[in-house]
Amino acid sequence: MDRKVVIIPTYNEKENIEKIIRAVFGLEGEYHILVIEDGSPDGTAAIVKRLQEEFPERLFMIERKGKLGLGTAYITGFKWAVGQKYDYIFEMDADFSHNPDDVPRLYQACAEGADLAIGSRYCNGISVINWPIGRVIMSYYASVYVRTVLGMKVYDCTAGFKCYRRRVLETIDLDKVQMKGYGFQIEMKYSTYKLGFKVKEVPIIFVDRKEGTSKMSSGIFGEAFWGVLKLKMRKIKPRQA
């Protein structure tokens, strides 16, 4: 049976973390979860530790000291998952903006030949619920900008709901990834694309969080804007064995 792990970064997600863990474990197909916990002062880690007693072979957690950024959280998780020889490695938010019921659809896309499956808000028009119109427009045109500059045929370039085959993460030089915020999502997709892997977008409906606080900021978009121009100039090389 394929080994599958869902990586969920957390910072102050006490309202959501138990519900999202139980939702993923309720899916058919034996998924494991790795929580990357960045020192939440609200007690998120304590909730995960309690649940680890209930799911000792399926729920794992790496605790980090302080809020170190989305990109570094995922890279920490990727390295762990590759070391544990998981076949399929997922990225997912804790706040239910990504529907757990879509996880098997991303897995299916990879099982049928994709190396990276993206849960896409924009490949079938715009599928976003509960966002202010200004944020929808900014996000949509950010992807248009990225697609134009990088020449990458992906409609949702900043999506954070994804499934990788392990070989993609073994090939990308994770130590050379430079962007830390949402630009990280762009850089990982571009690296996957430039290294010749097959990328497929799977349409999803994205629903903004109902509980907890968003981690978005204007600085995140600034990093992504300038980072894309720098990314265009870089030569993407596979990791040296």
Image (spheres, grey):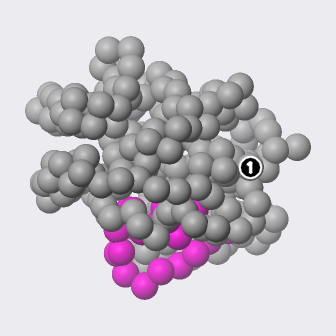
Q: Which residue appears at 43% of the width and 85% of the height?
A: 65
Where in the figure is residue 159, as x and y percent of width and height? 38, 39
Q: Quadrant of residue 136?
A: top left
Quadrant location of the N terminus?
top right
Q: Is residue 152 above or below residue 215?
A: above
Where in the figure is residue 21, as x and y percent of width and height? 62, 53
Q: Is residue 241 above or below residue 146?
A: below
Left or right? Give the position of 86 relative to 92. Answer: right
Magenta stretch in the rendered image: 60-78
Q: Which residue is at the far top?
A: 124
Q: Which residue appears at 71% of the width and 25% of the height?
A: 112
Quadrant location of the C terminus?
bottom right
- Between 101 and 62, which is closer to the camera in this rendering? 62
Left or right? Give the position of 66 relative to 168. Answer: left
Left or right? Give the position of 239 relative to 149. Answer: right
Q: Is residue 192 above or below residue 81?
A: above
Where in the figure is residue 174, as x and y percent of width and height? 49, 64
Q: Is residue 104 visible?
A: no
Task: Find numbered disc 1 in the image and state the secondary structure of the residue it sits on.
Answer: loop
Q: Is residue 38 above or below residue 108?
A: below
Q: Which residue appears at 58% of the width and 55% of the height?
A: 171
Label 1, residues with CA under 10 Å away: few <14, some 14-19, many ≥20: some
The residue type indicated by label 1 comes to Asp
Q: Which residue appears at 81% of the width and 65% of the height?
A: 57
Can residue 63 be found in the magenta stretch? yes
Q: Quadrant of residue 239?
A: bottom right
Can residue 180 be found in the magenta stretch? no
User: Disc 1 designates what residue?
Assistant: 87
Q: Which residue is at the far right?
A: 1
- Between 228 and 118, which is closer to the camera in this rendering? 228
Q: Is residue 120 visible?
A: yes
